[in-house]
């Protein structure tokens, strides 16, 4: 973050300064544990706590000023008083973003957002300084915090945009003002909150609707929801496809245990691509990132794309492959799960590890609402009918129905499941883990890796 005076911040957010001193801050934090010398601690309200309760702790760690919704007489550094901490943070982030001529690329979709972000970051970083979303800071709090990391050196800002209700992407776009938008795909993630696939599509399309006439929309021609509505988009467009016609397409896909290779065609030229992750669905992510890089038309060469994709850092817990001392292989894809990503990942896993004994460890897919029971039963039938596993183990309330339909074994606790895996996993097995993040399957993986 570039240094900025607290008087300027207060003016932007209509805040009142107490203990006024003419100082500048170099960083914004919302967690007192992250406070450092010279930072601004910004108190916001969470589900369980109000950040202002920890303001004194932030000051003790070096915070030069704080933003609060109510005055605390124990604090002797400058305090900016506001009516709503979160809204004022969003307002300031939008103002701060406008200080820079940076081009913002927004990425949303039901699956593949983080991997696409990392791929595009790797490509663009071949030539330019790039700021990108860290971790899962992709919501109404995380996105403003990411933007507050902008500096003069940055040419691009690649932002992941998550949403679980209508209007959220629109709000994020008002803050970030993207020049380019990527919608990876439309799936049933968060369908419990949205209520229908139609509503999910409507929410994601808010990204394209926010683009100006000079903006760029990256279109997934393989997605049956996105392609039809893309005809109504008035800004510039570039399309990609793994199976049909598009501006950027591919052929000869080969997915192996630790990498995937394919031939990519861009503007009449073809390139041999290798990405350091397994899974055919990751080819779609690579095509979308490459499409954006080409459409930005800013000196990114085809060689930059080849090297950027080859050397990108795969996100943790997304088809992450480990080998145990006994020789078994663990595939950790347990960062998150929804019906579409679950079926895609399992199908790819069974094809890649066709010559090993396949052990599936499945946990609940959350946030499906009234669709949850049916989707878990459907997943079990998909596994059984497709012969995607030699052994199926599940844990979680809803995954019990996956085990019933999939002819698997269900465990009431992760501890019981871990003991069973330690007993049965043998040299040469491929053990695949997938569930929603809150199930924390990494607890089992840690035991098995030992």
Image (spheres, rainbow, N blue to C red):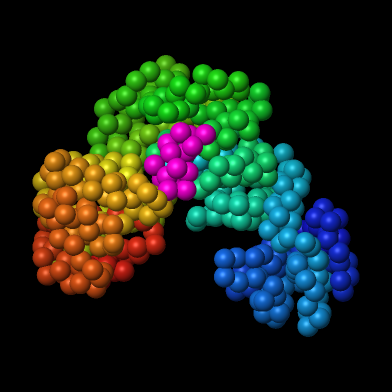
Q: Give the residue at the far front of this rendering.
A: 370
Q: Quadrant of residue 100?
A: top right
Residue 97 lies within the magenta run: no
Would residue 243 be found to the left or right of residue 207 on screen? left
- Quadrant occupied by the C terminus: bottom left
Would residue 64 be found to the left or right of residue 328 on screen? right
Would residue 163 be found to the left or right of residue 214 on screen? left
Identify which residue, 193 or 179, lies in the foreground: 193
Residue at 81% across, 70% down = 79
Residue at 39% across, 26% down = 224
Residue at 13% across, 63% down = 425
Q: Is residue 377 visible?
A: yes
Location of residue 300 in the rendering, given as x and y in whole percent from the top left corner: 54, 31
Location of residue 371 in the rendering, given as x and y in whole percent from the top left corner: 35, 46
- Quadrant occupied by the N terminus: bottom right
- Magenta residues (range): 188-202
Location of residue 211 in the rendering, given as x and y in whole percent from the top left corner: 63, 30
Identify which residue, 144 or 264, lies in the foreground: 144
Residue at 69% across, 52% down = 90
Placement of 215 over or under 161, stated as above or below: above
Placement of 400 over or under 206, stated as above or below: below
Q: Give the residue at the far bottom of this rendering.
A: 74
Would residue 41 be found to the left or right of residue 262 on screen? right
């Amino acid at each position: 973050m570039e240094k900025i005076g607290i008087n300027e911040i207060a003016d932007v957010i209509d805040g009142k300064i107490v203990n006024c001193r003419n100082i500048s801050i170099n960083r914004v934090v919302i967690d007192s544990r992250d406070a450092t010398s010279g930072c601004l601690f910004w108190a916001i309200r969470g589900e369980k706590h109000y950040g202002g309760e920890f303001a004194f702790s932030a000051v003790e760690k070096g915070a030069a000023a704080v933003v609060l919704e109510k005055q605390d007489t124990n604090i002797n550094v400058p305090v900016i008083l506001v009516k709503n901490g979160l809204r004022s943070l969003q307002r300031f982030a939008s103002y701060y973003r406008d200080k820079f001529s940076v081009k913002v690329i927004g990425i949303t979709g039901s699956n593949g957002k983080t991997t696409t972000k990392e791929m595009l970051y790797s490509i663009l970083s071949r030539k330019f300084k790039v700021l990108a979303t860290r971790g899962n800071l992709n919501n109404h709090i995380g996105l403003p915090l990411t933007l507050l990391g902008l500096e003069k050196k940055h040419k691009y800002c690649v932002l992941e945009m998550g949403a679980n209700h209508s209007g959220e992407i629109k709000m994020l776009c008002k803050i970030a003002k993207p020049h380019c938008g990527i919608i990876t795909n439309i799936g049933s993630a968060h369908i419990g909150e949205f209520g229908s696939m139609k509503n999910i599509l409507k929410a994601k399309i808010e990204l394209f609707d926010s683009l100006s006439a000079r903006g760029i929309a990256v279109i997934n021609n393989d997605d049956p929801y996105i392609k039809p509505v893309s005809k109504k988009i008035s800004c510039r467009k570039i399309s990609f496809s793994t199976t049909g016609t598009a501006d950027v397409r591919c052929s000869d896909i080969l997915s192996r245990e630790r990498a995937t290779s394919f031939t990519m065609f861009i503007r009449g030229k073809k390139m041999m691509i290798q990405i350091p992750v397994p899974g055919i669905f990751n080819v779609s992510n690579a095509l979308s990132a490459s499409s954006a890089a080409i459409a930005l038309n800013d000196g990114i060469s085809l060689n930059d794309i080849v090297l950027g994709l080859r050397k990108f850092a795969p996100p943790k817990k997304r088809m992450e492959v480990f080998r145990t001392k006994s020789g078994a292989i663990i595939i950790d894809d347990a960062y998150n799960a929804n019906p579409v990503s679950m079926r895609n990942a399992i199908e790819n896993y069974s094809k890649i590890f066709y010559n090993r004994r396949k052990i599936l460890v499945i946990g609940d897919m959350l946030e499906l609402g009234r669709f949850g029971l049916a989707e878990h039963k459907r997943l079990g039938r998909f596994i059984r009918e497709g012969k995607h596993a030699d052994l199926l183990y599940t844990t979680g309330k809803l995954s019990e129905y996956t085990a019933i339909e999939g002819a698997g074994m269900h465990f009431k606790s992760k501890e019981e499941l871990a003991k069973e895996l330690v007993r049965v996993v043998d040299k040469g097995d491929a053990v695949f883990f997938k569930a929603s993040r809150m199930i924390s399957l990494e607890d089992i993986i840690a035991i098995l890796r030992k």
